[in-house]
Amino acid sequence: MNSRLLLAFLCVASLSTGCIIVDDNRPPPPPSTPGDVTFLWTFAGLRCNEARDVYGVNITIPGEQLHNNGQYPCSANDVDGITLHDFAPGSYSYTLEAVDFRNQVLFEASGTFVINGDRTVTVDLMPTGDPASYAYLNWTFPGGRSCAAAGVTTVDVTIDEVSKTFNCADGQLASGVQSPLLAPGEHFIEFIARTASGQPLYYFNGDLVTKAYDPVSATYGLYAVGGASISWKFFDGSVLFDCNQMEPNLQIGVNFQDTITGAWVYGVVGDWHTCSDKPILYSYLRPGTYKVSLYAKTSNGVEYRSNPNIDPILVQAHEFPGPEGALEVVLSRQ
């Protein structure tokens, strides 16, 4: 009997639970193979013909003696990069320095690569002495819909109060869209996806974390939004009156409380407007039901509040009431 079959039979027959069959006839794993490494580079997103101050790129790989002492032209044969040949299998670290014609370093990057056959390393070098970097941004819509299926033409992206409008389809490409240069750390980011006529349909806000000298990639799921229109009047216990009978710069705080989660859309602070600015149109609310809360306090300390028991409003996806459909909320003197 074949020895492996006999061992299997004995294991089945045994009451022991610790029997392990090892197949000594398994083929060994294939050996690692040497190869070439190709570096392809850009400079804060720019090609060689765009980063005109860059004369060449110096490469350092510890333990390796490179041709021409590791100094290479920025572009050769229409390729922004270089191929280095005949590396033994293993892991390597590298440093790239883009230099001007005086050999002063303008951009730099570092990292590692592993050789087991040929390898391509794509590197975006960052300005020397400036830790700013950027992000490649992508967005998605519910159900994995494309921009066309979602009815979206453009996406407004705001990072730390700086806004730029992109074609929606560009944010669904594998490469995404590139943010401006940002200091390393946490940033506020906001997306507004709009129709060709400018109507917002999807929204997201949250955080973007960037790293020094190291571009990051981030994908955000935008959610459908609807709107609400809010107006107000005042009641002092006997008379209903309007803003023209209040002090000129009276501020009104508006907030929405989700009836399911209890969360306040504008936190504990609220969203504040001058009394005469009404009605206020809100366009970035998640679909659902909300209690509306309004508050005002005059300069002499008189408070006005809305009734906490007023009926909730219903926000529906892609529906945006205009001024004529505003909910008029009464604030009563306390």
Image (spheres, rainbow, N blue to C red):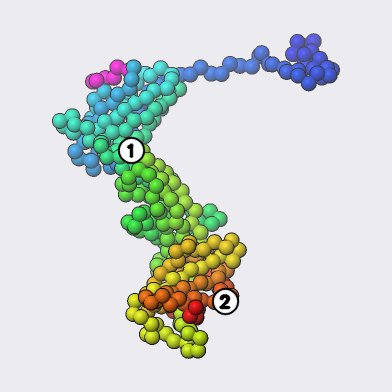
Q: Secondary structure at mark 1?
A: loop
Residue 59 shown left or right of residue 200 in the figure: left
Residue 323: image location, x then y, percent: 44, 79
Q: Is residue 230 visible?
A: no
> Foreground: 314 or 116?
314
Residue 106's image quarter? top left
Residue 3: image location, x then y, percent: 75, 10
Q: Which residues are magenta?
A: 64-69
Give the label on residue 213, or none.
1
Callout 2 amino acid: Ile
Q: Earlier in the sequence, mark 2 or mark 1?
A: 1
Q: CA distance from mark 2 to mark 1?
A: 53 Å
Residue 25 shown left or right of residue 313 in the figure: right
Callout 1 amino acid: Tyr
Residue assigned mark 2: 310
Q: Is residue 198 visible?
A: yes
The answer to whether residue 104 is above or below residue 228 is above
> Foreground: 146 or 239?
239
Q: Residue furthest front?
A: 300
Q: Quadrant of the N terminus?
A: top right
Is residue 66 part of the magenta span, yes or no?
A: yes
Residue 266 shown left or right of residue 1 in the figure: left
> Foreground: 253 or 181?
253
Is residue 198 part of the magenta span, yes or no?
A: no
Residue 255: image location, x then y, percent: 48, 68
Q: Residue at x 34, y 76 (%)?
A: 249
